[in-house]
């Protein structure tokens, strides 16, 4: 997908994931979006479907258009920053009415020092990235402009998160978009800043030449800490390559000493010095910065035209693609230290098919014996075609980290290692525990305490946990909770990536 298509896709994905009841985007809207997506075949199905749904949402909900505007890179930054840098460069030469050009003062030497520091920072960041296996990014890896743009969207998301369902969905979208577009935003920010640095140097040198047309400036120097030898070394290092390129000779240390204003010198004609600084600026500032700007512009163009979006490893995407391809989803259920009744298995199968489609294929493993989790994990195998894996526990059992916890973490870690994208969730069947408690006065409190103990024990296993009465709870409510659990796991996978 390109950037615009990816933005619409992530927007619709966030809204549909939040809007489980079809209030913001109705069932009819989704059916029409599916039809629009199918109109051109399967290749661009997700992009066409998202475009239709996004237009429908923008028409009905004005906030959607505002949020999409927050999510876009402000194109005016691309010209405002470089133009402002050019003007600042022109204005930064403070030779004024004295008609003197200090050959070691800002903005000349300072401009080079700043750019060399930036180059060292880029090289250092590259070395750190290679040491970390090529992984860079995050807020610390972005430039100033990228952090500014991301910060604006983040503050907008914080405001919306405290609002209604649409606000929460839009806040979720902005968060995901900030993360997904971080590399693109960083490339655009770097392109803009590198171009601005190049134009700042153009402005500084251009300002020197412009003023020198009507006034004769005298070149000299003075310093509290530097002597003629030190100034000669700095000048030779900085202007030596430009001297070789232009043929303009560099003065020796004795000549430099004679240019010191504090020793009574009136300086010399600044023309050769201006030429040397102009050539040095072209060599060390303008050309490298333009190369860096071009590099980041090409990177931004590539990312904008080939924007990375979730694929089949994502719950939402896989469900949509299943619908257009006509394939059946695969749901695997593994009970641990618990042998549910035939009636419970039948009902759970019905619930799974209601949540994931009538064509879903449900595979139910034999119960894993208590204490046999490690042996089972070694031989179980995790097929990549499995869409969802449900771990089934009995709430009546006392949760034990060394058994139940090892089993849950083992499953999620092996799925993660296999990179199959299988979504996981842990279901605590509370039906037998409810029957055991009966009509005791503290039954609700004991149920809550037992649920909390299980959730605490399974915390960090990498799978959402939810409890349900598989024998007595109303089926529609159970279906929604089952869908929500796997949707939460998909969101967790996105955050981990």
Image (cartoon, rainbow, N blue to C red):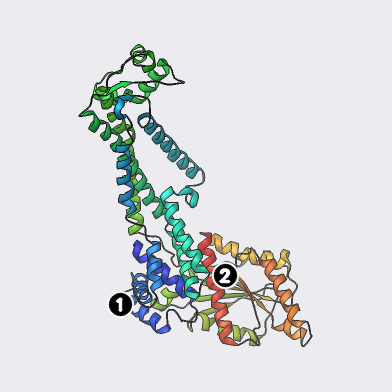
Q: Residue placed farthest to the top in the image? A: 254
Residue 63: x and y in percent read: 41, 71
Q: Is residue 433 left or right of residue 388?
A: right
Q: CA distance from mark 2 to mark 1?
A: 33 Å
Residue 439 lies, with reference to residue 83, above or below; the image says: below
**Figure disc tally:** 2
Residue 389 lies, with reference to residue 264, above or below; the image says: below
- Residue at point 53%, 60% (across, down): 496
Q: Earlier in the sequence, mark 2 or mark 1?
A: 1
Residue tagged by mark 2? 424
Pointer 2 and pointer 1: residues touching (CB < 8 Å)?
no
- What secondary structure is found at the residue carrying circle 1? loop
Q: Nearer the viewer, residue 231 or 16?
A: 231
Q: Nearer the viewer, residue 303 or 281?
A: 281
- Residue at point 58%, 66% (across, down): 381
- What secondary structure is found at the residue carrying circle 2? strand
Residue 311: x and y in percent read: 43, 66
The quadrant in which residue 345 appears is bottom right
- Residue at point 35%, 13% (across, down): 264
Residue 348: x and y in percent read: 60, 83
Residue 186: x and y in percent read: 41, 51
| Quadrant containing the N terminus in the rendered view | bottom left
Residue 215 lies, with reference to residue 357, above or below; the image says: above
Please say whether residue 420 is visible from this viewpoint. Answer: no
Q: Nearer the viewer, residue 316 or 204?
A: 204
Residue tagged by mark 1? 39
Q: Nearer the viewer, residue 472 or 273?
A: 273
């Amino acid at each position: 997908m390109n950037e615009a298509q990816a933005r619409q896709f992530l927007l619709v994905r966030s809204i549909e994931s939040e809007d489980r009841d079809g209030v913001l985007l109705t069932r009819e809207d989704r059916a029409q979006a599916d039809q629009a997506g199918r109109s051109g075949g399967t290749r661009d199905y997700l992009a066409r479907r998202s475009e239709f749904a996004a237009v429908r949402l923008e028409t009905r909900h004005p906030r959607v258009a505002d949020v999409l505007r927050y999510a876009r890179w402000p194109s005016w930054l691309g010209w405002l920053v470089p133009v402002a840098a050019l003007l600042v460069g022109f204005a930064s030469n403070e030779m004024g009415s004295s008609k003197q050009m200090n050959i070691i003062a800002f903005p000349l030497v300072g401009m080079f020092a700043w750019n060399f520091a930036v180059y060292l920072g880029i090289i250092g960041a590259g070395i750190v990235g290679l040491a970390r296996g090529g992984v860079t990014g995050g807020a610390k890896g972005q430039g100033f402009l990228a952090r500014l743009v991301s910060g604006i969207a983040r503050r907008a998301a914080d405001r919306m998160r405290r609002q209604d369902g649409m606000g929460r969905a839009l806040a979720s979208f902005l968060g995901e978009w900030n993360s997904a577009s971080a590399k693109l935003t960083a490339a655009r920010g770097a392109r803009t800043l590198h171009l601005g640095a190049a134009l700042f140097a153009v402005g500084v040198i251009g300002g020197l030449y412009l003023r020198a047309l009507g006034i004769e400036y005298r070149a000299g120097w003075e310093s509290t800490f530097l002597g003629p030898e030190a100034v000669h070394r700095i000048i030779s290092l900085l202007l030596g390559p430009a001297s070789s390129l232009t043929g303009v000779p560099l003065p020796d240390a004795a000549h430099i000493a004679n240019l010191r204003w504090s020793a009574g010198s009136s300086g010399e004609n600044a023309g050769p010095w201006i030429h040397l600084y102009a050539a040095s600026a072209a060599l060390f500032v303008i050309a490298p910065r333009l190369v860096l700007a071009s590099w980041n512009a090409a990177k931004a163009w590539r990312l904008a035209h080939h924007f990375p979006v979730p694929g089949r490893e994502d719950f939402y995407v896989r469900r949509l693609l299943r619908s257009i391809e006509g394939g059946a989803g695969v749901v695997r259920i593994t009970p641990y230290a618990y042998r549910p009744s035939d009636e419970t298995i039948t009902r759970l199968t019905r619930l799974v098919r209601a949540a994931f489609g009538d064509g879903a294929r449900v595979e139910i493993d034999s119960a894993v014996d208590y204490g046999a989790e490690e042996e089972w994990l070694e031989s179980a195998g995790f097929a990549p075609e499995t869409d969802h894996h449900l771990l089934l526990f009995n709430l009546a059992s006392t949760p034990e980290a060394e058994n139940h916890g090892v089993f849950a973490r083992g499953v999620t870690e092996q799925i993660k290692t296999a990179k199959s994208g299988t979504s996981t969730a842990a279901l605590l069947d509370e039906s037998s525990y409810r029957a055991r408690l009966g009509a005791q006065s503290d039954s609700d409190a004991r149920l809550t305490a037992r649920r909390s103990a299980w959730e605490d024990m399974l915390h960090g296993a990498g799978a959402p946990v939810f409890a349900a009465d598989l024998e007595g709870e109303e089926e529609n409510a159970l279906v929604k909770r089952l869908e929500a659990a796997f949707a939460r796991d998909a969101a967790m996978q996105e955050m981990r990536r």
